[in-house]
Amino acid sequence: MTQRRCAGRVGAIDLSGIRKLFDAGGPDAINLGIGQPDFDTPGHIKEAGIQAIRDGKTGYTPNAGIPELREAISEKLRHENGLSCQTENILVTAGGSEALHLVMQALVEPSDRVLIPDPGFVSYAALAAIAGGRPEGMPPDETMHIDIDHAQERMDGARLLVLNSPSNPTGMVESEASIRALVEYADDAGVTVVSDEVYEHFTYGRKHYSAALYGDDVITINAASKTYAMTGWRIGYLAAPEEYVNGCLKVHQYCQACATSIAQYAAVAAYTGDQSVVAEMKQEYLERRNLLYAGLRELGFDFPEPEGAFYMFVPMGRDLIAQTIEGGIIIVPGDAFGENAPDHARLSYATSKENLNRALERLNKIKGE
Ligand SMILES: Cc1ncc(COP(=O)(O)O)c(C=O)c1O
């Protein structure tokens, strides 16, 4: 009999703990598990995609992306992030996810150490492992920010340092001083920094600083997904020194060929069009953050105010996490994000205020039982 075996490196990783939750809960469940904007893609962006279909722009595009989009992204990086990137430094990918995958495949040698935040976005450890590397979790400090001393201690001999500010799942934003210190240290230690900035626009009272401002050996990962409510369009990019872009391009060329043509045209409209749509979404997230945080504090949860993205990472204890999910509020247990915070759960406020109020009421009941 044929043995249906997948390669060991794939067998060793689990399906994402978050995806598993998507189907959980009954019809009455309140979903705070979701990691994507609940807004529709803004009209002018959708129109650009529709127009691209009408114009027959439906064939393969250049592997690295259409020139207009690479130019729009390099211009965005210049004026929003203060980075001087040429189009040659940009590779357009199928979402931030593919950009992360390419970087791991192109840079990581077997057994290379890859430092990742723990708790951190679920893909980092899996993608490092699929590339043959050894992911190593960096624990946070007591405020859920990066523990700089700890990260620096681990840096010698590592291949990559993955940063993610604003963070999924903690909702924390790193200060300029922290990012600068880490990037400069990494530079000295010969560690390449991978800075995942997909939530850069959603910060509340804090400013976002791009890691590439502070060193030359930094790869910036970003996407249209969260900023423009475009998760399903699958447009992301990496911005990097040309040597890395060329390496990533080889992998991209053979596995993806190019990002979806019509989505690339829509993304040009996103990056070059009216940016007030982003400000409107940010304002709404801010109001929801305030509502959920105040409600949770009233219920007795004591944790620092989340500063960005659309998540809060709440110290609930394992029993209450399980009761909450059983009681019909979908939240993501901390062990989906690594090993360091099993007593926490991620609550997403990418959902209506009405849902947040209902969730708070229901949580109050569950807590009292
Ligand atoms: C921190 C982080 N990076 C990257 C991604 C991937 O985004 P995309 O949908 O663009 O692949 C996500 C999605 O949840 C994320 O939370």
Image: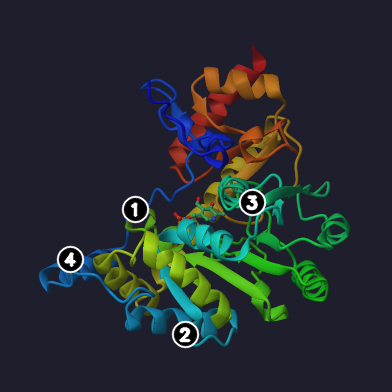
Q: Dot 4 lies on which element?
A: helix
Foreground: disc 3 or disc 4: 4
Quadrant position of residue 340:
top right
Q: Amino acid at mark 3?
A: Gly
Whole-angstrom CA distance, mark 4 to mark 2, is: 28 Å
N-term-proximal mark, 1 vs 4 = 4
Q: Residue at x 55, y 55 (%)?
A: 286
Q: Amino acid at mark 4?
A: Ile
* CB at disc 2 and ligand 1 closer than 8 Å: no
Quadrant position of residue 43:
bottom left
Specify the quadrant that holds the N terminus.
top left
**Cβ atoms at labels 1 and 2 below 8 Å apart:** no
Whole-angstrom CA distance, mark 3 to mark 2, is: 32 Å
Foreground: disc 1 or disc 2: 2
**Cβ atoms at labels 1 and 3 below 8 Å apart:** no
Q: Dot 1 lies on which element?
A: helix
Residue 337 appears in the rendering: yes
Specify the quadrant that holds the C terminus.
top right
Q: Residue at x 29, y 69 (%)?
A: 266
Q: Looking at the picture, does residue 189 appear above or below residue 136? A: below
Residue 236 appears in the rendering: no
Pointer 3: what residue? 171
N-term-proximal mark, 4 vs 2 = 4
**Cβ atoms at labels 4 and 2 below 8 Å apart:** no
Pointer 1: what residue? 232
Pointer 4: what residue? 50
Give 171 or 363, whichever is nearer the viewer: 171
Total marks placed: 4
Q: Badge 1 local density, few (<14 within 10 Å), some, or many (20+)?
A: few
* CB at disc 4 and ligand 1 closer than 8 Å: no
